[in-house]
Amino acid sequence: MRGIVTRGVGGLYGVRLAERPEEEILCRARGILRQKKLSPTVGDDVRVELATEADRREPLIPPEDGEAGRRGGSRMKRPEKRDRGVDVDYVIDAVEERRSLLIRPPVANLDILFAVIPCAAPEPDLLTADKLTVIAENYGIETVIVVNKADLDPEKAREIARIYGTAGYRVFPLSAAGGEGVDALRRYIRERALDAPDGGHVSGAFAGASGAGKSTLMTALFPDLRLATGSVSRKTERGRHTTRHVELWPMDMDGGTFWIADTPGFSMLDFTRFDFFPYDELASSFREFGDCLGKCRYTKCTHLREEGCAVLAKRDAGGIAASRHESYVRIYEEQRSVPEWKRRQNEGSR
């Protein structure tokens, strides 16, 4: 059977069957995955089979711990003791090739990242939003900009929409609390769900600075989400001190299914783990820089302040928002300050 990993705790995995997403089965991972150094992760497309007696004797393989590399690799720790855990009827026999794998929170095959930026209360943090776009670009994940609380400061909402519209992103100004503009975003999500390829799925996550209004927005978009997330299997949550990580929930979008990643504290993807990110390649993660790269006066132009820089010329002409270039400079300097030994160390976990 084909399915999608929707949650994982302590070596047990919830898998919803692709043909019947309303049905979830509890699985362990087959031992051969350990030999491949592959740990199932929420969002993985997997193959599921009935468990054999040999499977039941295998130790549990814990879920992805978030220290994996960015392009689909995985790092697993050998269990300290042989934990046969809960007896279940199914095993994950294979993990299909991943389109992407985020580091923290760990989630595979994410298609859309909704970067939520508030216009006010709190003040918009564009650096945080730009870091989110960099991470998403680096993983090949589509970014959609949601300008929330637009009713509190319409002028600021228009300014933010202009910044990211100029950069080439899809932008949705709205008020999650008041409902204005929410239907337009819902229609977009429904269209994406209906366009999912045969046998595939479309998934998304909401992220942004604390106070951006993500929870209010998700409740407005997916009224059934709170009910779904309120019922977690006692069998899976068997550890008294268990921390709930990412969970994937199927949302019915009038004929299409959109898988939404939900987790406590999903306020900001962990940018600090990007110490291995090559700072001299950062410019390619700012999509509006694209037509400038290779056209600067100097071959090794950093696009910070050099004369004859095509990026700076485009910024001065209004083709690149000043705030976006300021974020580029900040991120570049942060990444350049990482010691080389630490960068090499983190490259080893890719």
Image (cartoon, rainbow, N blue to C red):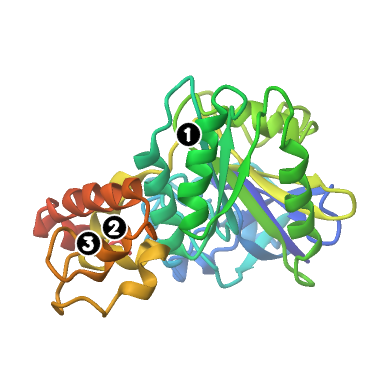
Q: Are marks 3 and 2 in contact (CB under 8 Å)?
A: no
Residue 234 in the image, given as x and y percentages of width and height: 69, 29
Label located before the other in sequence (1 or 3): 1
- Does 29 appear above or below 147? below
**Is 280 rendered above or below residue 233?**
below
Q: Which residue is mark 1?
A: 267
Q: Quadrant of the C terminus?
A: bottom left
Q: Callout 3, which amino acid?
A: Tyr
10 Å neighbourhood of mark 1: few (<14), some, or many (≥20)? some
Picture coordinates of residue 322, whole percent (x, y): 32, 49
Q: Residues within 10 Å of mark 2 (few under 14, many from 20)?
A: few
Disc 1 and disc 3: Cα gap in Å?
A: 24 Å
Q: Residues within 10 Å of mark 3 (few under 14, many from 20)?
A: some
* Residue 289 vs residue 219, the one in the foreground: 289
Among numbered discs 3 and 2, the one appearing first in the sequence = 3
Q: Which residue is mark 2?
A: 316
Distance from Cα at disc 3 to Cα at disc 2: 23 Å
Residue, disc 3: 279
Which element type, helix, strand or loop, lies under badge 1?
loop
Q: Is residue 22 visible?
A: yes
CB-based contact (under 8 Å), mark 1 and mark 3: no
Does 143 sit left or right of 219 as displayed? left
Circles 2 and 1: CB atoms closer than 8 Å:
no
Q: Nearer the viewer, mark 1 or mark 3?
A: 3
Q: Which mark identifies residue 131?
A: none
The amino acid at mark 1 is Ser
